Image (tube, rainbow, N blue to C red):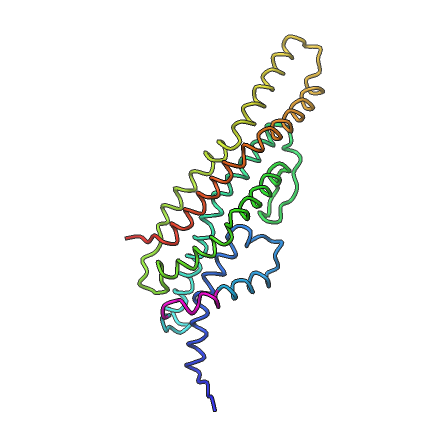
Amino acid sequence: MITISSEMMQTWVISLLWPLTRILAVVGTAPVFSHRVFPVRSKVALAVMITLIVLPTLPQMPKFDVFSVQGLLLLAQQIIIGVAIGFSMRLFLAAIQIAGQMIAMTMGLGFATFFDPQTQGQTTSITQFINILTMLVFLSLDGHLMVISAVSQSFFTMPITLDFQGIDYLQVVEWGGYIFSLGLMLALPAVATLLIIQMALGVLTRTAPQLNIFGIGFPVTLSMGFLIILLTLPGMLKPIQNLIELGITNMQVISQTTTP
């Protein structure tokens, strides 16, 4: 007769809890996985499935009581590592939203906003369009599989132990500084063209004061904005792809680099 002791049961729970916590943190912050369109049960089921797949390859887990001080510290450590891995990828996708906001505000669609359940804030239609396009490119590059690969590799480069020295948080902060510059570079063609159009409308208003600039300016900038997006959309795919690859590379760096 097979008997299961309390120590054996606790060992099984601990072996599953530590990696599951890190993977759940990644699923809750990484792009696509963290989208609110997926039910919480599906996210938990996905995290459990990934954990069961990688569990046989993981090194031996530390045998701390879950409710002890060491256990709580180890649990918090896994959450921080998982959030850092997922956030490092999500960080660069924020540049896409900044580019969409710049384009929408310049072409006069700043008022066309609606509630975005993902960010829990107001977003423009242009931002949402570019964001959907980015997610499609992300999936076409197998970015979701690379996220799973990065978190699986992190268990060997950043093992589950209290002796772990941590990740380079300063590097994550420095990457955050690239958001505005990358977003501006992505939106620069549309913003520069619309700025020239608005300057031309300003000159036209000075030369012909009888023209109603508010009556003709908005339709012109709106029409030209859509035309510019149509013309520059094929050229935006390569920068978006490079941005996603940069985010994936930095996500892998986070999962492989520890502070000395």
Magenta segment, principal secondary structure?
Answer: helix
Q: Position of residue 84 (x, y in %)?
A: 43, 52
Q: Quadrant of residue 154?
A: bottom left
Q: Is residue 110 left or right of residue 160?
A: right
At 68% from the left and 24% from the top, the residue drawn is: 218
Q: Is residue 113 left or right of residue 182?
A: right
Outermost top residue: 207
Outermost left residue: 260
* Residue 249, placed above or below residue 183: below
**Magenta part of the chain:** 51-60
The count of marks equals 0
Inspect the magenta stretch and tell me whether residue 112 lies in it: no
Q: Is residue 221 left or right of residue 257?
A: right
Q: Quadrant of residue 149?
A: bottom left
Inspect the magenta stretch and tell me whether residue 53 lies in it: yes
Q: Considering depth in this image, is 20 or 73 the residue closer to the camera?
A: 20
* Residue 241, placed above or below residue 194: below
* Residue 136, placed above or below residue 166: above
At 31% from the left and 63% from the top, the residue drawn is: 163
Q: Considering depth in this image, is 212 or 41 the residue closer to the camera?
A: 41
Q: Is residue 101 left or right of residue 80?
A: right
Q: Position of residue 198 (x, y in %)?
A: 60, 19
Q: Position of residue 9 (x, y in %)?
A: 45, 79
Q: Position of residue 18 (x, y in %)?
A: 43, 67
